[in-house]
Image (cartoon, grey):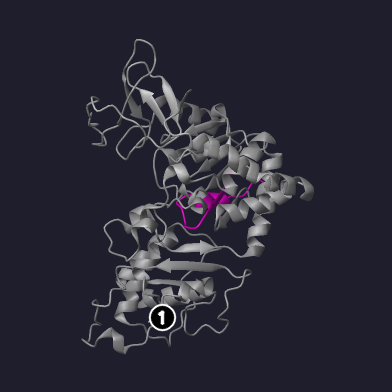
Amino acid sequence: MASASVLDNNYCCLRTCVNKCLKPSDNKVHVRAPCQYKESGLENKDGQNDTKAEMLAEWDENGEAKFHMKCWKLLRGVAWQKSENVSTANNNLVKNNNSNLPSMHQVGGNLKISEREKHLVAEASLTVEFYSSDVMLKREAKRIASMLRKCKYSIVFTGAGVSTATGVGDYRGINGKWTNKGKNNGTSNSKQHGPRLEDIRPSYTHEALVKLVDMGHVKYVISQNTDGLHRLSGIPEDRLSELHGNSFIERCEVCATKRELRHGYRRGPTDASVPESICDMCKCNHRTGRRCAEKDCNGYMRNTVVNFGDKLEEEVLKDAVTHAEMATFVLVLGSSLSVSPANSLIEMGKEPLRLAICNRQVTGFDVKCFELDSSGNQLGSRVFGDCDDLLREVMKCLMDADEQRLWEDAREDRMKKYDAQRTLNGRQKKL
């Protein structure tokens, strides 16, 4: 097996790859299969231990590997031909596929794959992450910038992927919360839990969206995130729907007054006399342990986070639907679009609706990005990779070089403002 430093090296992990170097101009994949990697596991069908058979790929001690797109296609194809398990995993991938992703053709018939590696490929296929080449990234950034300029009503829909650059984990990626759930994968607690919400600050993408709103290119932002970074970065309240709530906002269950905290709702001073109240839907206690400060109220404050099983806040969803229905262009950033009813919002706009998606994994909506207009031109865009990389290229297309440099150089000053809103412990602001 390869050493733990495989992912620190910029080379393809397929042993038979001729051009080992992973260059910016290459389409790439990053995979991980922690469960099937365990050394005490699998034997092939004829009873021989798989350690006697050489792996086709170099997997690190966490079951991770990087490949050229075509090399992953080859490895996956060999495994798929010989394993129903891998066939199922790959068919799930291909169902949501498009012409820019690998197909299962031209498989190297002379390659032999061990039983263990077939299972590694099967597990890795469920969470595989793709990265477009720099050429494709820049080309699609120009297309997206053009749509932002020309479309009458552009909105942005964001998921966990816009915050991963800040240290916050995602949910369905190769190291995501749901991916890791129940798996003994050797990752440290700090990596799994990430930084405290109070300590994270807006990413390049968060700040770029504020700038795009200021420039008039983006009319509204709909987010599934609860980390509060869109509001902290400066998206106006009337231009933002936080579908799943905000960890820094609590609401009185009596008078409905909202207050924005400088710390997450789980921190700060509490009143021991506040009783718990277990939610019938999510089975969690939404009360924060504080009381309403409004005169003659004294009601119990509740967090606004929407857990799995909870209903979305009616007013927030209503605003999101209103703007989604007005959209002529929807830019999806960092979302797998797996959660309903939130994902239905991206298709509510006016036809012919333009849709662009940037994240690392396939979604059930990818095919819509490749729909054609009446003249046979592609309506949308599909980019695989990190949101910050895409937004940097988009901003280059929408701002002149001096303007962009001045804006980016001012980040240090903006950071001071963010710090001021997060570090005065216990202070609250009425909304």
Mark 1 residue type: Ala
Residue lying at 43% horizontally and 67% vertically, measured from the top left: 31
Is residue 352 something that shows in the picture?
A: no
Above or below residue 415? Residue 142 is: below
Label 1: how many Cα within 10 Å (few below 14, some 14–19, many 20+): some
Direction from residue 355 to residue 250 in the image, left or right: left
| Residue that numbered label 1 is attached to | 2
Q: Quadrant of residue 350?
A: top right
Quarter of the figure that contains the N terminus = bottom left
Asked whether 41 or 73 is in front, the reply is: 41
Asked whether 2 or 376 is in front, the reply is: 2
Asked whether 58 or 164 is in front, the reply is: 164
Above or below residue 359? Residue 78 is: below
Which portion, as a residue range, is magenta?
351-376
Above or below residue 238? Residue 196 is: below
Give residue 320's position: percent from left, percent from top.
49, 31
355 is within the stretch colored magenta:
yes
Residue lying at 62% horizontally and 40% vertically, measured from the top left: 414
Residue lying at 29% horizontally and 68% vertically, measured from the top left: 35
Residue lying at 23% horizontally and 88% vertically, measured from the top left: 48
Direction from residue 389 to residue 245 in the image, left or right: left
